[in-house]
Image: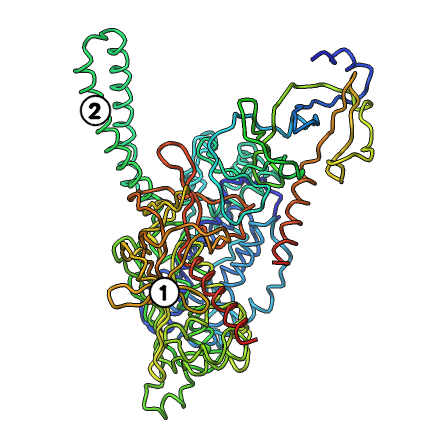
Amino acid sequence: MSATATASSGGEILQLVSFHVDEEEFGLEILRVQEIIRIQPLTRVPASPAFVEGVINLRGRIIPVVSLRQRFGLAPREPDKLTRIIVTEVSGTVLGFMVDAVSEVLRLPMSTVEPPPRLGRVEREYVRGVANLDNRLLILLDIDRLMSEAEEEVCIETTQA
Amino acid sequence: MNNEMAQDPVLIEEFLVESEELLERMDQDMVLLEENPQDAEILNRIFRALHTIKGTSGFLGFDPLVRLSHQAEEILNNLRRGELRLTTRITDSLLQSRDQLGIMLRDLRHGGLQNYSLDDLLAELVEAQGPPVRESSVPTLSSVPPLDVAALPSSKLEDVAPQQIRIVEAEAVAPTFAAPLPHMEAVAEIRTEVAKVVQPPSNESGNKTADSQAQTLRVDVGKLDELVNLIGELVLERNRLAQISRDLTSQPDDLRAIAEALNLSAARLSFITDELQTTGLKTRMVPIETVFRRFPRLVRDVAHGLGKEVELIVRGEDTELDKTMVELVGDPLVHLIRNSLDHGLEMPELRASKGKRREGTIRLEAQQEGDQIVISIKDDGAGIDPERIARKAVERGLVTPERVQLLNRAEILDFIFLPGFSTAEKTSNLSGRGVGMDVVRSNLKKMNGSVQLESEVGAGTTVLLRLPLTLAILPVLLVRVREDVYGIPLRSVIETARIQPHEVHRVEGGELLHLRGRTLPLLRLGRIFQQTETVDNDARAVILGLGERRVALLVDQLLGQESTVIKPLSALFHDIACLAGATISGDGRVRLVLDPAGILATADAAVRLAAQGASA
């Protein structure tokens, strides 16, 4: 909310939900977020892609939960009381992304976002850009790309099997 | 003047739904009429159908529809008056007109009428009748506004529901209009009024109209009344619960009485919700006739095309099943009936030479058996030769020559359902492209149903489709495999048994279970899901039955039985063949439901792989 003042000067404003996975901080457009829920008992789905943690009951709907840690190839970690599931819709499918913690809602002018530099682990094409906040770096995630690449990988896995 | 008049999408939708229903019915009736050309009732039904379409089309300004239905109606009129005899040419021309009307309705649904060259068809409708008996005295309808103007004071128009606007018979109106037309101005006025009252169809609502057909359903008012009553009881029960809650706060000392009241309320609530569920599902039930009635026409046309003589016997049309099922079962049935026509039934001469009736029979029958609907398609054709199937299966590499020797008849016939399997020596545009039976099976699987085939060489083939009454509710057996709980659809469970380690035998490519003198393939979920080994041998086995086949599934514990509402898994999991869906348990957790047919197919594939590996 502190960035409201820059709204008039910076042109188009991005509203983001920021969250943590491992050491990194990420941002996801707020319009893409349907809700943010606490971790709840997951049901494992056998023979499903590795990055799918399982399925949960979201008020009578059954939605898959994707672990961003797994998706980014990071070591798994036991969920704790900060762990959250960000519910979103990707190409017609409602799904949840499990993240280590959700921190805040941010408003940033589009001009502070730079194209993705060469990053360490989480580079690739599902980074839309990087926002430079006072003393931290926020990675803007392209979840559509993230999931379509994930599905391609699944296809490759299954054809190789 | 096609679309000059502003048209109410609701009105058009109603017209489309009604007309489509009439046309479907007409298909069936035309075939019936061909068999009983003197039947006045059928004749009248077809006439009324065309007449209704013509009338409403006229009102809505759909000119091509009016022209065609009018000309077709003429024939029916002449037939009714006995001035004309029904010939194959006339039947064909009427069926053609019906199809053309169908095309126009479809176009209307998807945007609007196109330009149609109807002249040939209209001419054929006249010529098919032979030399004209007399000049038609009925004026063409396009020149007569088909509105009973006198009955419609324009000031009241806004109060008139579309259904109440009566289309009057052209014959009755014609004399009125022979005289000067005092109401003509009024008609113009009404049209403008109508235009004002109704909204022009925007693109958006147009799209909605196109999609809404599948969403609408005619429901028996009795069923709805029952539903409303139950909802009333539910509201009463809610009030009682609220009272109990208040009592709990105001009289915390009176716990015993409150607990008793709560128990009672919970029991009533459970009764009401059960009833509500059953009744709610009943509103979704429609007679299977809506699917069956397209088949007389299909059989007639295909049989004519093939030069075969076929009698179609339809039974059990009034069997009810879920609306979704009715829609899903249509295509598989079309395919199966075409198969029977194409491959099953022999040519008349061949039949005669074998001492059969020249005319082949296809018997289409639906009936309810417990919580299932069984649809059978039975023909008295040539039947399927298992040896030919076995040969083909070996050729296609679906099975090794050694293994095929060990399979029984039912298992060999089962190859027909594998993708890419087709035994038709020459393919036709109807069937025999090898895309058929596997699609039938996968469609049935989508509905939690099964398909089974019996055939005797020379005597014919019977295909049995088994469908649950509804997609929504599924009784399952809950089992535990290590820490995971799964549901298994109860209808596939034959029995459960405690098994001892010495009853399990390892063989090449799998394991077998000896159970009371029978030998069954033994499956482990862990292996099917490619996980590490799970269950001890000292465990329970669930015996699954699918058609004639029996397999044993090893589990750790049987947890009991539950009626569940099955929900689809996310699209992310569509490749997982062994899961039918998921359900939500009492504690709110998601529970996976296994698909017995998928498990069997996966196990079969594993056996085939092992067999190929062994032979390579």
Query: Nearest the camera: A24 or B30?
Result: A24
Quarter occupied by residue A137: top right
Residue located at (39% from left, 72% from top): B411
For the view shown, which residue lies furthest in the bottom direction? B353
Res B263 label: 2
The answer, for residue B311, to whether it is visible in the render is no
SS category of the residue bearing label 1: strand
Q: Quadrant of the C terminus of chain B?
A: bottom right
Query: Nearest the camera: B416 or B166?
Result: B416
Residue B19 lies, with reference to residue B74, above or below; the image says above
Image side of residue B372 versus residue A16, left or right: left
**Residue that mark 1 sits on:** B505
Q: Badge 2 sits on which subunit?
A: B
Label 2 close to label 1 by CB (< 8 Å): no
SS category of the residue bearing label 2: helix
Query: Nearest the camera: B74 or B251?
Result: B251
**Residue B389, horizontal then vertical, whole percent:** 45, 79
Image side of residue B374 versus residue A8, left or right: left
**Residue B433, horizontal then vertical, whole percent:** 55, 73
Residue B150 lies, with reference to residue B326, above or below; the image says above
**Residue A148, horizontal then vertical, whole percent:** 67, 44
Residue located at (62% from left, 50% from top): A154
Q: Which of the two discs, 2 and 1, labels the residue nearer the N terminus?
A: 2
Q: CA distance from mark 2 to mark 1?
A: 51 Å
Dot 2 amino acid type: Asn
Task: Please rate how many residues cluster around mark 1, counting C-alpha atoms within 10 Å: few if below 14, some from 14 to 19, many from 20.
Answer: some
User: Share a chain, discs 2 and 1?
Assistant: yes
Dot 1 amino acid type: His
Residue located at (54% from left, 62% from top): B100
Q: Badge 1 sits on which subunit?
A: B
For the view shown, which residue lies furthest in the front direction? B502
